[in-house]
Amino acid sequence: MSANHHERRRRLSGLLPPAGVEAILVTKPVNVRYLTGLVSSNAALLVTAAGGAALATDLRYFEAARKMCADIEVIEGRDTAGVLARRAGPVRLAVEGHHLPVAEFRRIAPEAEAGEPLPLSGLVEEVRTVKDEAEIDLLRTACAITDQALADVLAAIRPGVTERAIARMLQGRMLELGAEKAAFDTIVAAGPNGAVPHHSPTDRPVAPGDFVTMDFGALHAGYHADMTRTVMVGPPADWQRELYELVRTAQRAGRDAVRPGATAHDLDAAARDLITEAGHGEHFGHGLGHGIGLEIHEVPFLGPDKPGRIEDRVPITVEPGVYLPGRGGVRIEDTLVTRVDRPELLTQTTRELLIL
């Protein structure tokens, strides 16, 4: 067990008394991984306000868990949640209400000695928001793989190549560079399809005069990269140059606004106001970005109606876009980390318009 995992559990323990509980049963697999290092399809973790912890998993993962988690009790059993609900004893117990199914909650509730557990949401996610330097280093590697994959594929993007073929090339190159897999379903949108922010790649071939938007990322050691670049195939029309420059300027303004203490609303506004002033407010229909780490979408979420402030060492994306129905669109996205002096860019590919 690394010191990082112990520190993460300590921070979680400190959130329990203010929440009115003495222990929490963690069942969301990504949260169990974050707190113990164990990657498993069947594990649960009990963490107490006093700093104690117990991990339950089945025979498939038991020996790995014992080696990895030598400083906490490891219990073998398939009914991991039930085992730990009983193990908690006469304490006020919380469960992850946003993850545990209602049927599972009803099944294990009688096992808790102190009465029905309290469903709580987001406590572990709150701890996960601020990353340690080891996590940031893993994100940095994921982003470097993503950057290199695009650099290696750019030369193949030309008229006649389909969206689906470009997506396969990006995904294959990320694997060759050491990624576990793609961090999410790769988006490639050419020409008018670029007006759909989450377009699924098709067999539409790229044509001269197309914008091609690529939104993709590598998964490395459980950590997700996320980058979007829009490139031009052939000489751009005046409207395409203007649209691209607007989004590039807005994206830079969003990045420049990132600092500890900034609100989610203000970060979004830094980019959105420029797009609105240019007459395209109705064509930017999503938030500016989101947190990223062990999940592709994590808190904080950046948008006009999103609460909260950004802390130091929080990885986020900044991804404004303008989407013109029937014509195409532009999105530029980077993964970066908030720092006291200035944000650290993890994705490095140029934001200048690339004309292929």
Image: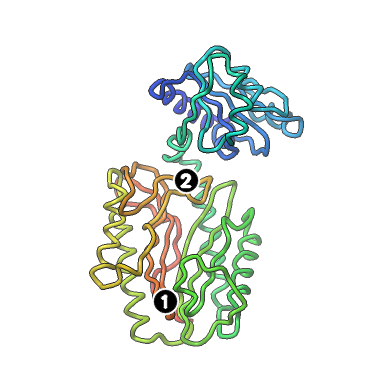
Residue 85 found in image quarter: top right
Given residues 82 and 316, the one toward you in this image is 82
Q: Amino acid at mark 1?
A: Pro
Q: Residue at x 31, y 43 (%)?
A: 309
Q: Which residue is mark 2?
A: 136
Indicate which disc, 2 or 1, sits on the residue closer to the N terminus: 2
Residue 321 on image: x %, y %: 38, 67
Q: Amino acid at mark 2?
A: Ile
Quick check: marks 2 and 1 in contact, CB under 8 Å?
no
Q: Secondary structure at mark 2?
A: helix
Q: Residues within 10 Å of mark 1 (few under 14, many from 20)?
A: few
Numbered mark located on residue 325 in the image: 1
Q: Is residue 278 left or right of residue 251?
A: left
Q: Does residue 156 sit above or below 112 in this rendering?
A: below
Given residues 108 and 133, the one toward you in this image is 108
Residue 182 found in image quarter: bottom right
Q: Residues within 10 Å of mark 2 (few under 14, many from 20)?
A: many
Residue 106 on image: x %, y %: 60, 28
* Residue that sits furthest to the top in the current view: 90
Q: Does residue 284 sit above or below 237 in this rendering?
A: above
Numbered mark located on residue 91 in the image: none
Q: Residue at x 69, y 22 (%)?
A: 75
